[in-house]
Image (cartoon, rainbow, N blue to C red):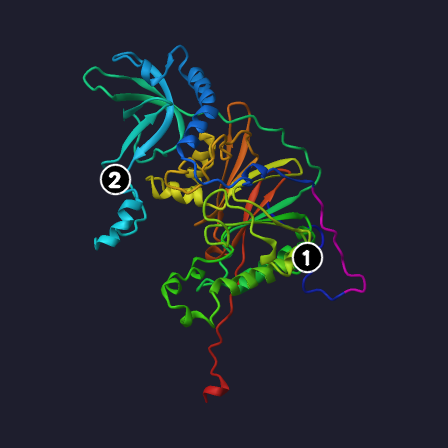
Amino acid sequence: MVFSGGSDAGKLMTEPTDDPATFQRKSSKYVNKSERFLLKDRQFSRQYAHLYTVRLSLMGHKVIEAAKNKWDDVPVKKLFELKPGERCAIIGTLFKHMELQPSILKEISKEHDLLPLPPREKYIDEADQLILEDELQRIHLIGNLDVHTAITGTIMAVLGMEHEDQPGKFQVEDFCYQTLPQQPDLPKLETDRYVVFISGLDFGSNTYNPIATQLMSDMLTGNLGDPGQQEASSQIVRLIIAGNSLSKDTKDKDSVNKAKYLTKKSDAKSVQAMKNVDDLLLQITSSMEVDIMPGEFDPANHTLPQQPMHRCMFSQAQKYPTLHCVTNPYDCEIDGVRIIGTSGQNVQDIYRFTSLQDPLEILEGTLKQGHMSPTAPDTLGCYPYYESDPFILTECPHIYFAGSCTQFKSKVITGDEGQSVLIVCVPNFNETNTMVLVNLRSLECQPIKFEAVFPVDDTESPVDK
């Protein structure tokens, strides 16, 4: 697929005409389905054990159904019903005991003049163990299940037996997760309509590239290219900014420890960075619909689900009704195409606590396991839900994405009942100068990279003479 215009392509250098070409941006039907991520009653006094109980209760019956379909007549039992030497399947929540997992108890060791543990890229260790828990008991898992690729917090079924000479340990032969949930029919659109995904604009970064950002804005608003390119840009119906509009460089931790009189007349780097984000959104929202999600370094709550950034932060762009501040994770429907995704914290957290390297593989795993953030709340902060788990995928999306990835990757996953899901890793824009374009009619996607190369003039400057 090539994102290009029609018969007017290639007319950038032609003479201007008295009747310049004009193009009307295509409209789309939009429904925000992220209501379950909005926090109405913020109560943080509850224990996180309730969340695991609810997760197992809501997903357990689907996993049991998948286990029976895969292993036919093998009985599915509770942990307290296990008998040594009996081959069966058990259902529960997978928990990974990790020796190197960061702990608040280890962090407060600083107060006792002990050396803190250095930060790591990966927190896996050969001593890690897998444990399966249900409502009443837990049991250690050994055998055909890789401890380093397993993801804590997932609801799964394992096939095997407990040997008499190894009490308290379940020998795993095979395992499975729930099947993909039902998917609404993909609408048949008559013409091409595109959605653009961008993540990691990183305003305030020490390596910020303003030229690539401006080229991206000009393309989206139709101010770049010849009439053919402008016609193609008019087919873009929505922009989704998947988090990290601000850079981690705006988080000046040293200023927190400084005396107030030393920082009284200085502005935080995030203030100017937010003004720059507002300037960019002012350009784009004047021309098209924009959904902006909070990310790890954006001014929003840190735990998932992150609530929408307040519109008052965008003093100029907030005047346009085309600006939509949304949650992270984000769930919406555009022209009947269901889109669900995050700003990338779920993928990054799984990367740190498993041996998995490919973000696309991690994203695919969360889709097949039926849960967007299985490591929450163990290693990824989230709200202590009591009666629900909004991260469960109750309906199969058509597009499933994650932001703040190191590079662009995409893949189409097919389910047992004909489901087809496009999973997309949206790259960090400041590092790759790349945005992702998805065709809602065909679900084809492609990266678009912006580069500006300035030739070096080897001739001697008159000033140097």
Residue ID for mark 1: 319
Q: Amino acid at mark 1?
A: Lys
Q: Say whether residue 81 is magenta.
A: no
Q: Which labelled disc corresponds to residue 165?
A: none
Res. 395 image quadrant: top right
Q: Residues within 10 Å of mark 1 (few under 14, many from 20)?
A: some
Between 283 and 3, the residue placed more toward the observer is 283
Q: Position of residue 106 (x, y in %)?
A: 26, 47
Q: In front: 165, or 71? A: 165
Query: Which percent across, then down, holds residue 442?
Result: 62, 37
Above/below status of 458 relative to 24 = below
Residue in the picture at 49% in, 35% down: 391
Q: Earlier in the sequence, mark 2 or mark 1?
A: 2
Percent x, y of residue 397: 56, 34
The secondary structure that dominates the magenta segment is: loop
List the residue tagged with mark 2.
99
Q: Quadrant of residue 223?
A: bottom right
Toward the top, the furthest residue is 73
Q: Amino acid at mark 2?
A: Glu
- Chain part drawn in magenta: 17-28
- Which quadrant of the view contains residue 365? top left
Residue 72, image x, y percentages? 41, 12
Q: What residue is shown at x 68% (from left), y 65% (from top)?
A: 13
Which residue shows up at 32% across the image and 22% down it? 137
